[in-house]
Amino acid sequence: MDMDGIYRNLEEAERALNICGWIPVVSLLTGNLRVTAGAVEAAAGAAISVAAAAGRDRELCGHGLNLLFHGGMNIVRGNVEMCPIGHFLCFCYDLSGARYEYERHPWRNVRILNF
C-alpha cells in the first residue's frame, strides 16, 4: 500500500479546503464536507488498523491509527469552521503554521500492540 501517495493526496485536498474554509459563508459548506470526509477517513483508519493488527503488520497498523486520529481532527476542524467565527479561527490557526503532518505521525514507532 503506497501510504506516501495517499498522504500526499489527502494533504493537497485539505490545503484546498483550508483556503476555502477561510471564506465566511463558504466555510459552512467546507466544514460540512470536512466533517463527512473526516468520518470516512477515521472509519478507514479504524478498519486498516484492525486488519493490520489481525495480520500482525505493525507499520500498517500505525498508518491506520494515524488516519483514525487525523480523521477525528478533521471532524473537529469541520465543526469549528461551521461556527459563526470559525472561519476566522481556522484562518489564524493556518497562519500559525501549526499543522498535523501525515508523514511525521506519532503512531509510527508506538508499541501499542504486543506483536
Image (cartoon, rainbow, N blue to C red):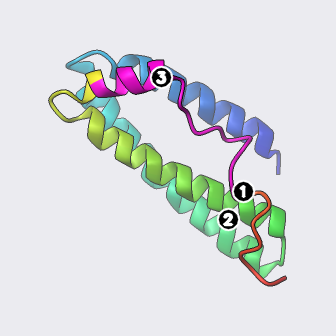
The residue segment tinted magenta is: 89-107
Task: State the residue position of label 2.
Answer: 48
- 1 vs 3, front mark: 3
State whether residue 64 is above or below residue 73.
below
Task: State the residue position of label 3.
Answer: 96
Q: Residue at x 33, y 18 (%)?
A: 22
- 2 vs 3, front mark: 3
Nearest the eye: 63 or 106: 106
Circle 2: element type: helix
Circle 3: element type: helix
Amino acid type, residue under disc 3 in the picture: Ser
Q: Are marks 2 and 1 in contact (CB under 8 Å)?
A: yes
Amino acid type, residue under disc 1 in the picture: His
Amino acid type, residue under disc 2 in the picture: Ile
Answer with the quarter of the image where residue 46 lies. Answer: bottom right
Q: Is residue 89 left or right of residue 70?
A: left
Q: Is residue 96 left or right of residue 50?
A: left
Distance (Cα) linking label 2 and label 3:
32 Å
- Residue that lies at the very extreme toward the left in this rendered image: 84
Q: Residue at x 28, y 38 (%)?
A: 80
Distance (Cα) linking label 2 and label 1:
8 Å
Nearest the eye: 39 or 80: 80
Q: Give whichever of discs 2 and 1 has the lower sequence position.
A: 2
Task: State the residue position of label 1.
Answer: 63
Q: Give whichever of discs 2 and 3 has the lower sequence position.
A: 2
